[in-house]
Image (cartoon, helix red, strand yellow):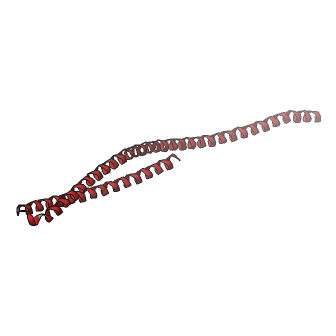
Amino acid sequence: MLQESFDAMDEDQPLNAEVEVSEQLSHYVEDLENETAVLEVDNLSLKNEIQVLSDSNIVLDDEILFLNEQIQELKTSIPELQNTITTQEETINQKQANINQLQEELQNSTANQDTTASSDGADVQNLQDIIQKLQNTITTQEETINQKQANINQLQEELQNSTANQDTTAS
């Protein structure tokens, strides 16, 4: 009978060991399933972050394209404005030369006034009127030149800002 008890105990021991191993494996599988669930949540979160970054990248690419277009427009308009200013300065110089010539003629006419007829007074007045008109035209064109120069300065500043924004956006 004692022998039977020992035999029964020996038979129970492998069963107990199998149950214990089975429980350990069950816990291990459960832990792996929990870790897999956590990793799936992390993976989903990372996918969402990737999508947000991708969307942001698209927006930034669009902004860079827009800024590049603005830079090109500014680069085109600055030389055009500078050419306009140069042309207007040349026109002003020509008109100033005309004024100088008319003033000289007026002085010559005034010097000869004592010896000429009264009709020269009308010529003098006409010359003075022409001189005044030319001076008014010069003043107007100088104001236009100053305005265009201010526009060029503003465009150059915008170009620098756009370039700086593009550099910042690219970084």
Left or right relative to 163: residue 119: left
Residue 33 sits in which quadrant?
top right
Left or right relative to 91: residue 76: right
Q: Residue at x 24, y 60 (%)?
A: 139
**Along the viewing direction, whichever of 99 and 18 lies nearer the viewer:** 99
Q: Is residue 131 above or below residue 170?
A: below
From the top left corner, tell me how far across and down residue 163 is, in percent.
46, 49
From the top left corner, tell me how far across and down residue 105 is, in percent.
17, 59
Residue 34 sits in which quadrant?
top right
Q: Residue at x 15, y 65 (%)?
A: 111
Q: Residue furthest bottom?
A: 114
Q: Residue furthest front?
A: 115
**Quarter of the image containing the N terminus?**
top right
From the top left corner, tell me how far across and down residue 27 is, in percent.
72, 40
**Along the viewing direction, whichever of 24 and 39 lies nearer the viewer:** 39
Q: Residue at x 32, y 50 (%)?
A: 86
Left or right relative to 19: residue 120: left
Q: Residue furthest right?
A: 2
Left or right relative to 106: residue 1: right
Q: Residue at x 31, y 54 (%)?
A: 148
Q: Is residue 111 above or below residue 30?
A: below
**Along the viewing direction, whichever of 107 and 153 lies nearer the viewer:** 107
Q: Is residue 48 above or below residue 100?
A: above
From the top left corner, tell me how far across and down residue 65 is, in percent.
43, 42
Q: How many marks?
A: 0
